[in-house]
Image: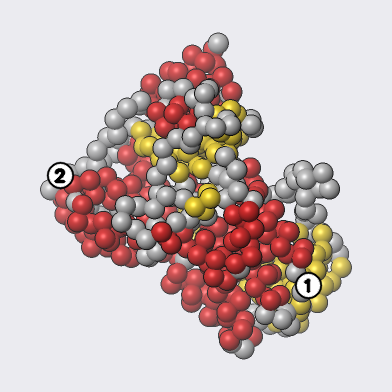
Amino acid sequence: MRTTIVGAGPSGTTAALLLARAGHDVTLVDRDAGPGTDGTWDRVGVMQFLLPQGLRGPGRLFLESRLPDVHQALLDAGAAYGAVPRGAPPFTAGLHLRRCTMERVLWACADREPGITRRTGHADGLVRDGDRVTGVVVDGEPVSADLVVDASGKAGRLGHELRPEAQETAAPFAYVAREYRLLPGAEPGPIEPGPGLAIPHDGFMEMVFVQDGGTFQTLVVRSTDDHELALLREEAAHTAASALLPGIATWTAAERAEPIGPVRAGAGLVNRFHRQPTDVTGLLAIGDALLVTNPMAARGLSLGMAAAGKLADTVATLPAEEWAGALDAWARAELLPWYDDHCAVDATMHARWRHEPLTADGPIGWDVIADAAHDHPDWMPVIGPYFGMFAQPSVLEPVREQIRAQLRDGWQPRVPGGLTRDELAGVVRAAVAG
Protein backbone atom coordinates (compact mmCIF):
# COMPACT_ATOMS: atom_id res chain seq x y z
CA MET A 1 0.00 0.00 0.00
CA ARG A 2 1.23 3.49 -0.88
CA THR A 3 0.99 5.81 2.11
CA THR A 4 1.83 9.50 2.25
CA ILE A 5 2.28 11.00 5.70
CA VAL A 6 2.24 14.79 5.94
CA GLY A 7 4.35 15.87 8.90
CA ALA A 8 7.59 14.24 10.07
CA GLY A 9 7.23 15.07 13.75
CA PRO A 10 7.14 12.35 16.42
CA SER A 11 3.63 11.09 15.60
CA GLY A 12 4.11 11.14 11.83
CA THR A 13 7.51 9.48 11.96
CA THR A 14 6.30 6.86 14.43
CA ALA A 15 3.47 5.99 12.05
CA ALA A 16 5.90 5.94 9.12
CA LEU A 17 8.21 3.46 10.85
CA LEU A 18 5.35 1.18 11.89
CA LEU A 19 3.77 1.18 8.42
CA ALA A 20 7.07 0.72 6.58
CA ARG A 21 7.97 -2.23 8.80
CA ALA A 22 4.58 -3.74 7.99
CA GLY A 23 5.55 -3.74 4.32
CA HIS A 24 3.95 -0.51 3.08
CA ASP A 25 5.64 2.08 0.85
CA VAL A 26 5.70 5.32 2.84
CA THR A 27 6.37 8.83 1.58
CA LEU A 28 7.11 11.17 4.48
CA VAL A 29 6.46 14.82 3.63
CA ASP A 30 7.70 17.77 5.67
CA ARG A 31 8.58 21.40 4.96
CA ASP A 32 11.79 20.86 6.94
CA ALA A 33 14.77 19.23 5.26
CA GLY A 34 16.08 17.94 8.58
CA PRO A 35 19.30 18.54 10.52
CA GLY A 36 22.11 20.28 8.69
CA THR A 37 25.38 18.56 7.87
CA ASP A 38 26.95 20.47 10.77
CA GLY A 39 24.32 19.10 13.18
CA THR A 40 22.36 22.33 13.56
CA TRP A 41 18.61 22.23 13.09
CA ASP A 42 16.30 25.23 12.96
CA ARG A 43 13.14 23.11 13.02
CA VAL A 44 10.35 24.62 10.95
CA GLY A 45 6.90 25.13 12.47
CA VAL A 46 7.41 23.28 15.79
CA MET A 47 6.93 25.60 18.78
CA GLN A 48 7.92 22.93 21.30
CA PHE A 49 11.18 21.98 19.56
CA LEU A 50 13.30 23.98 22.00
CA LEU A 51 10.77 24.17 24.82
CA PRO A 52 10.14 21.75 27.72
CA GLN A 53 8.75 18.33 26.94
CA GLY A 54 9.04 14.75 28.09
CA LEU A 55 7.87 11.21 27.36
CA ARG A 56 5.50 9.78 29.93
CA GLY A 57 5.45 6.12 30.99
CA PRO A 58 2.94 4.83 28.40
CA GLY A 59 4.95 6.43 25.59
CA ARG A 60 8.17 4.85 26.79
CA LEU A 61 6.49 1.44 27.03
CA PHE A 62 5.08 1.91 23.53
CA LEU A 63 8.55 2.48 22.10
CA GLU A 64 10.05 -0.37 24.10
CA SER A 65 7.49 -2.83 22.71
CA ARG A 66 6.74 -1.49 19.21
CA LEU A 67 9.96 0.32 18.20
CA PRO A 68 12.70 -1.05 20.46
CA ASP A 69 15.49 0.31 18.27
CA VAL A 70 14.11 3.83 18.72
CA HIS A 71 13.88 3.27 22.47
CA GLN A 72 17.50 2.13 22.62
CA ALA A 73 18.66 4.99 20.40
CA LEU A 74 17.04 7.48 22.79
CA LEU A 75 18.87 5.90 25.72
CA ASP A 76 22.11 6.01 23.73
CA ALA A 77 21.45 9.71 23.07
CA GLY A 78 21.29 10.40 26.81
CA ALA A 79 17.61 10.01 27.67
CA ALA A 80 17.10 8.71 31.21
CA TYR A 81 14.33 6.94 33.07
CA GLY A 82 12.23 9.18 35.28
CA ALA A 83 11.19 8.70 38.88
CA VAL A 84 8.14 6.61 39.75
CA PRO A 85 5.72 7.11 42.65
CA ARG A 86 6.44 5.22 45.85
CA GLY A 87 5.30 1.63 45.45
CA ALA A 88 4.79 1.89 41.68
CA PRO A 89 6.50 -0.70 39.45
CA PRO A 90 9.62 0.49 37.60
CA PHE A 91 8.02 -0.11 34.19
CA THR A 92 5.80 2.93 34.75
CA ALA A 93 8.77 5.32 34.44
CA GLY A 94 8.85 7.79 31.60
CA LEU A 95 11.88 9.14 29.76
CA HIS A 96 13.50 12.48 30.51
CA LEU A 97 14.53 13.96 27.18
CA ARG A 98 14.44 17.01 24.96
CA ARG A 99 11.96 17.32 22.12
CA CYS A 100 14.87 18.00 19.80
CA THR A 101 16.56 14.76 20.91
CA MET A 102 13.37 12.80 20.26
CA GLU A 103 13.05 14.30 16.79
CA ARG A 104 16.70 13.76 15.89
CA VAL A 105 16.56 10.10 16.89
CA LEU A 106 13.30 9.45 15.04
CA TRP A 107 14.55 11.32 11.97
CA ALA A 108 17.71 9.21 11.86
CA CYS A 109 15.75 5.97 12.29
CA ALA A 110 13.42 6.93 9.44
CA ASP A 111 16.38 7.80 7.21
CA ARG A 112 17.67 4.24 7.69
CA GLU A 113 14.31 2.58 7.03
CA PRO A 114 14.17 1.05 3.51
CA GLY A 115 10.42 1.54 3.09
CA ILE A 116 10.42 5.29 3.80
CA THR A 117 11.05 7.94 1.14
CA ARG A 118 11.40 11.57 2.21
CA ARG A 119 9.95 14.50 0.33
CA THR A 120 10.66 18.08 1.37
CA GLY A 121 7.87 20.49 0.55
CA HIS A 122 4.54 21.98 1.53
CA ALA A 123 1.31 19.99 1.35
CA ASP A 124 -0.98 22.30 -0.63
CA GLY A 125 -4.09 20.13 -0.52
CA LEU A 126 -5.64 16.76 -1.20
CA VAL A 127 -6.33 14.87 -4.42
CA ARG A 128 -9.82 13.36 -4.46
CA ASP A 129 -11.82 11.00 -6.61
CA GLY A 130 -15.37 11.40 -5.36
CA ASP A 131 -15.55 10.32 -1.75
CA ARG A 132 -12.06 8.86 -1.82
CA VAL A 133 -8.79 10.68 -1.11
CA THR A 134 -6.22 9.48 -3.64
CA GLY A 135 -3.22 11.62 -2.85
CA VAL A 136 -1.82 14.95 -1.77
CA VAL A 137 -0.45 17.92 -3.69
CA VAL A 138 3.10 18.81 -2.60
CA ASP A 139 4.45 22.11 -3.91
CA GLY A 140 2.00 21.94 -6.79
CA GLU A 141 2.75 18.33 -7.76
CA PRO A 142 0.26 15.50 -7.07
CA VAL A 143 1.60 12.55 -5.08
CA SER A 144 -0.64 9.50 -5.41
CA ALA A 145 -1.46 7.45 -2.32
CA ASP A 146 -3.86 4.80 -1.10
CA LEU A 147 -3.76 6.45 2.33
CA VAL A 148 -2.94 10.03 3.31
CA VAL A 149 -2.11 10.61 6.98
CA ASP A 150 -2.42 14.13 8.34
CA ALA A 151 0.28 14.48 10.99
CA SER A 152 0.86 18.15 10.16
CA GLY A 153 0.39 19.44 13.70
CA LYS A 154 -1.98 21.80 15.43
CA ALA A 155 -1.55 24.57 12.85
CA GLY A 156 -2.09 22.31 9.83
CA ARG A 157 -5.22 22.69 7.72
CA LEU A 158 -4.98 19.64 5.46
CA GLY A 159 -8.46 18.28 4.76
CA HIS A 160 -10.12 20.27 7.56
CA GLU A 161 -13.13 20.88 5.34
CA LEU A 162 -13.76 17.11 5.36
CA ARG A 163 -13.83 16.80 9.14
CA PRO A 164 -16.41 17.78 11.76
CA GLU A 165 -15.75 21.03 13.59
CA ALA A 166 -13.14 20.57 16.29
CA GLN A 167 -13.83 20.90 20.00
CA GLU A 168 -11.47 23.60 21.20
CA THR A 169 -10.86 25.55 24.39
CA ALA A 170 -8.11 28.10 24.84
CA ALA A 171 -5.80 27.30 27.74
CA PRO A 172 -5.64 30.47 29.90
CA PHE A 173 -1.92 30.12 30.51
CA ALA A 174 1.40 31.21 29.06
CA TYR A 175 4.91 30.50 30.25
CA VAL A 176 8.57 31.33 30.07
CA ALA A 177 11.30 28.71 29.97
CA ARG A 178 15.07 28.53 29.98
CA GLU A 179 17.44 25.65 29.34
CA TYR A 180 20.37 24.80 31.61
CA ARG A 181 23.09 22.18 31.82
CA LEU A 182 24.43 20.62 35.00
CA LEU A 183 28.07 21.45 35.64
CA PRO A 184 30.58 18.57 35.52
CA GLY A 185 30.19 16.44 38.63
CA ALA A 186 27.07 18.27 39.83
CA GLU A 187 24.12 16.26 41.06
CA PRO A 188 20.60 17.06 39.82
CA GLY A 189 18.11 18.83 42.04
CA PRO A 190 14.99 17.21 43.50
CA ILE A 191 13.00 15.07 41.05
CA GLU A 192 9.40 13.93 41.39
CA PRO A 193 7.46 11.42 39.27
CA GLY A 194 6.49 12.95 35.94
CA PRO A 195 8.45 15.53 33.95
CA GLY A 196 10.61 16.55 36.91
CA LEU A 197 9.35 18.98 39.53
CA ALA A 198 6.20 21.08 39.93
CA ILE A 199 5.55 23.54 42.75
CA PRO A 200 2.22 25.41 42.80
CA HIS A 201 2.10 28.97 44.10
CA ASP A 202 -0.68 31.44 44.77
CA GLY A 203 -1.19 32.81 41.26
CA PHE A 204 1.44 30.95 39.24
CA MET A 205 3.42 27.70 39.05
CA GLU A 206 7.09 26.85 38.82
CA MET A 207 8.32 23.67 37.15
CA VAL A 208 11.52 21.90 36.18
CA PHE A 209 11.58 19.54 33.19
CA VAL A 210 14.50 17.11 33.41
CA GLN A 211 16.01 16.30 30.01
CA ASP A 212 18.76 14.19 28.48
CA GLY A 213 22.50 14.64 28.70
CA GLY A 214 22.47 16.57 31.97
CA THR A 215 20.21 19.30 30.62
CA PHE A 216 16.98 20.61 32.08
CA GLN A 217 14.52 23.43 31.57
CA THR A 218 12.83 25.67 34.09
CA LEU A 219 9.29 26.83 33.50
CA VAL A 220 7.16 29.54 35.10
CA VAL A 221 3.48 29.33 34.19
CA ARG A 222 1.26 32.43 34.46
CA SER A 223 -2.23 33.50 33.46
CA THR A 224 -2.41 34.87 29.93
CA ASP A 225 -3.86 38.11 31.27
CA ASP A 226 -1.08 38.58 33.83
CA HIS A 227 0.91 41.19 31.94
CA GLU A 228 3.28 41.90 34.82
CA LEU A 229 4.52 38.32 34.97
CA ALA A 230 4.80 38.37 31.18
CA LEU A 231 7.91 40.49 31.80
CA LEU A 232 9.63 37.32 33.00
CA ARG A 233 10.67 37.00 29.37
CA GLU A 234 13.24 39.73 30.13
CA GLU A 235 16.50 38.10 31.21
CA ALA A 236 17.03 40.38 34.22
CA ALA A 237 13.55 39.65 35.54
CA HIS A 238 13.89 35.94 34.86
CA THR A 239 17.23 35.75 36.67
CA ALA A 240 15.91 37.62 39.70
CA ALA A 241 12.78 35.47 39.88
CA SER A 242 14.71 32.23 39.46
CA ALA A 243 16.80 33.03 42.52
CA LEU A 244 13.65 33.27 44.68
CA LEU A 245 11.59 30.32 43.44
CA PRO A 246 12.58 27.40 45.68
CA GLY A 247 12.60 24.56 43.17
CA ILE A 248 14.13 26.56 40.32
CA ALA A 249 16.67 28.22 42.63
CA THR A 250 17.87 24.82 43.85
CA TRP A 251 18.28 23.50 40.33
CA THR A 252 19.92 26.63 38.89
CA ALA A 253 22.32 27.48 41.71
CA ALA A 254 25.63 28.76 40.31
CA GLU A 255 27.54 25.79 41.74
CA ARG A 256 25.10 23.34 40.10
CA ALA A 257 24.18 24.52 36.60
CA GLU A 258 24.65 27.12 33.89
CA PRO A 259 22.19 28.48 31.32
CA ILE A 260 22.75 27.26 27.76
CA GLY A 261 19.96 29.13 26.01
CA PRO A 262 17.95 32.34 26.13
CA VAL A 263 14.69 32.88 27.97
CA ARG A 264 11.94 31.61 25.68
CA ALA A 265 8.22 32.34 25.87
CA GLY A 266 5.35 29.98 25.09
CA ALA A 267 1.82 31.22 24.44
CA GLY A 268 -1.24 30.53 22.30
CA LEU A 269 -1.92 27.29 24.17
CA VAL A 270 -5.10 25.38 23.34
CA ASN A 271 -6.85 22.12 24.05
CA ARG A 272 -8.39 20.68 20.89
CA PHE A 273 -9.98 17.41 19.82
CA HIS A 274 -10.71 16.93 16.11
CA ARG A 275 -12.62 13.92 14.84
CA GLN A 276 -11.71 11.84 11.78
CA PRO A 277 -13.10 12.53 8.29
CA THR A 278 -15.59 9.66 8.26
CA ASP A 279 -17.37 10.77 5.05
CA VAL A 280 -14.33 10.03 2.87
CA THR A 281 -11.98 7.08 2.53
CA GLY A 282 -8.21 7.30 2.47
CA LEU A 283 -7.55 10.15 4.93
CA LEU A 284 -6.69 9.76 8.62
CA ALA A 285 -5.37 12.22 11.22
CA ILE A 286 -3.00 11.63 14.14
CA GLY A 287 -0.81 13.65 16.49
CA ASP A 288 -1.69 17.28 17.07
CA ALA A 289 -3.95 17.14 14.01
CA LEU A 290 -6.13 14.89 16.17
CA LEU A 291 -5.53 15.99 19.78
CA VAL A 292 -3.78 19.00 21.29
CA THR A 293 -3.46 19.42 25.06
CA ASN A 294 -1.88 22.02 27.30
CA PRO A 295 1.79 20.91 27.36
CA MET A 296 2.11 21.47 31.12
CA ALA A 297 1.52 17.76 31.87
CA ALA A 298 3.79 16.51 29.04
CA ARG A 299 1.15 14.11 27.73
CA GLY A 300 1.29 14.99 24.03
CA LEU A 301 4.12 12.74 22.85
CA SER A 302 2.68 9.65 24.52
CA LEU A 303 -0.85 10.23 23.26
CA GLY A 304 0.42 10.99 19.76
CA MET A 305 2.38 7.74 19.64
CA ALA A 306 -0.65 5.82 20.86
CA ALA A 307 -2.64 7.23 17.93
CA ALA A 308 0.12 6.31 15.48
CA GLY A 309 0.10 2.77 16.81
CA LYS A 310 -3.67 2.52 16.57
CA LEU A 311 -3.56 3.79 12.99
CA ALA A 312 -1.04 1.11 12.02
CA ASP A 313 -3.11 -1.59 13.71
CA THR A 314 -6.32 -0.37 12.08
CA VAL A 315 -4.80 -0.37 8.61
CA ALA A 316 -3.46 -3.89 9.20
CA THR A 317 -6.76 -5.40 10.30
CA LEU A 318 -9.65 -3.58 8.59
CA PRO A 319 -10.74 -2.71 5.05
CA ALA A 320 -10.12 0.87 3.93
CA GLU A 321 -13.80 1.81 4.19
CA GLU A 322 -13.69 1.15 7.95
CA TRP A 323 -10.42 2.89 8.82
CA ALA A 324 -11.76 6.34 9.68
CA GLY A 325 -14.73 5.07 11.67
CA ALA A 326 -12.59 2.69 13.71
CA LEU A 327 -9.90 5.27 14.45
CA ASP A 328 -12.55 7.85 15.31
CA ALA A 329 -14.29 5.51 17.75
CA TRP A 330 -10.97 4.68 19.40
CA ALA A 331 -10.02 8.36 19.69
CA ARG A 332 -13.36 9.30 21.25
CA ALA A 333 -12.92 6.53 23.82
CA GLU A 334 -9.18 6.90 24.51
CA LEU A 335 -8.18 10.50 23.66
CA LEU A 336 -11.25 12.68 24.14
CA PRO A 337 -11.24 12.05 27.93
CA TRP A 338 -7.75 13.60 28.11
CA TYR A 339 -9.03 16.66 26.27
CA ASP A 340 -11.86 16.99 28.79
CA ASP A 341 -9.39 16.41 31.62
CA HIS A 342 -7.16 19.26 30.50
CA CYS A 343 -10.12 21.60 30.08
CA ALA A 344 -11.15 20.82 33.67
CA VAL A 345 -7.74 21.44 35.23
CA ASP A 346 -7.21 24.61 33.21
CA ALA A 347 -10.53 25.94 34.50
CA THR A 348 -9.99 25.08 38.17
CA MET A 349 -6.35 26.14 38.31
CA HIS A 350 -7.16 29.48 36.68
CA ALA A 351 -10.10 30.03 39.04
CA ARG A 352 -7.90 29.32 42.05
CA TRP A 353 -5.26 31.76 40.82
CA ARG A 354 -7.99 34.40 40.61
CA HIS A 355 -9.21 33.48 44.13
CA GLU A 356 -12.61 32.42 42.79
CA PRO A 357 -14.34 29.76 44.94
CA LEU A 358 -14.97 26.39 43.33
CA THR A 359 -18.52 25.03 43.19
CA ALA A 360 -19.82 21.49 43.50
CA ASP A 361 -21.41 21.61 40.05
CA GLY A 362 -18.29 22.95 38.32
CA PRO A 363 -15.25 21.14 36.94
CA ILE A 364 -12.92 19.30 39.32
CA GLY A 365 -9.41 19.37 37.90
CA TRP A 366 -6.50 17.21 38.93
CA ASP A 367 -4.98 20.14 40.80
CA VAL A 368 -7.98 20.07 43.16
CA ILE A 369 -7.79 16.28 43.44
CA ALA A 370 -4.09 16.44 44.29
CA ASP A 371 -4.78 19.00 47.01
CA ALA A 372 -7.66 17.04 48.54
CA ALA A 373 -5.61 13.84 48.43
CA HIS A 374 -3.36 15.16 51.19
CA ASP A 375 -6.19 14.27 53.56
CA HIS A 376 -7.13 11.05 51.75
CA PRO A 377 -4.14 8.72 51.37
CA ASP A 378 -6.64 5.94 50.64
CA TRP A 379 -7.22 7.55 47.24
CA MET A 380 -3.71 6.76 46.00
CA PRO A 381 -4.53 3.35 44.44
CA VAL A 382 -7.07 5.20 42.28
CA ILE A 383 -5.35 8.48 41.48
CA GLY A 384 -1.80 7.12 41.20
CA PRO A 385 -2.34 5.21 37.93
CA TYR A 386 -4.18 8.23 36.51
CA PHE A 387 -1.33 10.63 37.29
CA GLY A 388 1.02 8.16 35.61
CA MET A 389 -1.31 8.01 32.55
CA PHE A 390 -1.88 4.29 33.08
CA ALA A 391 -5.59 4.83 33.82
CA GLN A 392 -8.18 6.97 32.07
CA PRO A 393 -9.50 10.15 33.75
CA SER A 394 -12.83 8.36 34.23
CA VAL A 395 -11.33 6.43 37.18
CA LEU A 396 -11.41 9.71 39.11
CA GLU A 397 -15.20 10.00 39.13
CA PRO A 398 -15.66 8.42 42.60
CA VAL A 399 -13.02 10.80 43.95
CA ARG A 400 -14.65 13.76 42.25
CA GLU A 401 -17.97 12.87 43.85
CA GLN A 402 -16.35 12.93 47.27
CA ILE A 403 -14.80 16.31 46.51
CA ARG A 404 -18.15 17.67 45.34
CA ALA A 405 -19.64 16.61 48.66
CA GLN A 406 -16.81 18.40 50.46
CA LEU A 407 -17.43 21.54 48.40
CA ARG A 408 -21.10 21.45 49.32
CA ASP A 409 -20.00 21.30 52.97
CA GLY A 410 -17.88 24.43 52.54
CA TRP A 411 -14.47 22.94 51.81
CA GLN A 412 -12.12 24.75 49.42
CA PRO A 413 -8.67 23.70 48.24
CA ARG A 414 -5.72 25.18 50.07
CA VAL A 415 -4.01 28.37 48.93
CA PRO A 416 -0.38 27.38 48.35
CA GLY A 417 2.17 28.90 50.67
CA GLY A 418 5.48 30.46 49.75
CA LEU A 419 6.12 33.27 47.30
CA THR A 420 2.88 34.82 46.04
CA ARG A 421 2.10 36.17 42.63
CA ASP A 422 2.12 39.76 43.92
CA GLU A 423 5.50 39.26 45.55
CA LEU A 424 6.89 37.76 42.35
CA ALA A 425 5.46 40.65 40.32
CA GLY A 426 7.25 43.09 42.63
CA VAL A 427 10.55 41.32 42.00
CA VAL A 428 9.91 41.41 38.25
CA ARG A 429 9.09 45.14 38.24
CA ALA A 430 12.19 45.99 40.22
CA ALA A 431 14.44 43.91 37.95
CA VAL A 432 13.04 45.44 34.76
CA ALA A 433 13.35 48.95 36.20
CA GLY A 434 17.01 48.22 36.87
Q: Residues within 10 Å of mark 2 (few under 14, many from 20)?
A: few
In this rendering, position of residue 39 left or right of residue 331: right
Q: Quadrant of the N terminus?
A: bottom right
Residue 236 on image: x %, y %: 56, 19
Can residue 100 be spotted in the picture? yes
25, above or below 10, in the image: below
Residue 347 on image: x %, y %: 38, 47
Q: Which mark is residue 56?
A: none
User: Which residue is rendered at x = 42% and y = 54% of the image?
Assistant: 342
**Number of marks drawn:** 2
Which secondary structure, mark 1?
A: loop
Do the CB atoms of the residues marked 2 and 1 lie less than 8 Å apart? no
Can residue 159 be spotted in the picture? no
Residue 407 on image: x %, y %: 19, 48
Q: Which mark is residue 410?
A: 2
Q: Nearer the viewer, residue 190 or 357?
A: 190
Label located before the other in sequence (2 or 1)? 1
Residue at the far bottom: name it.
319
Type of residue at label 1?
Pro
Q: Nearer the viewer, residue 372 or 209?
A: 209
Residue at the far left: name it.
409
Residue 241 on image: x %, y %: 47, 23
User: Which residue is rendered at x = 58% and y = 31% of the image?
Assistant: 184
Residue 235 image-quadrant placement: top right
Q: Nearer the viewer, residue 348 or 202?
A: 202
Residue 338 image-quadrant placement: bottom left
Which secondary structure, mark 2?
A: loop
Q: Which residue is mark 1?
A: 114
Q: Estimate the spatial distance between the alpha carbons at disc 2 and disc 1, rounded to whole Å.
A: 63 Å
Type of residue at label 2?
Gly
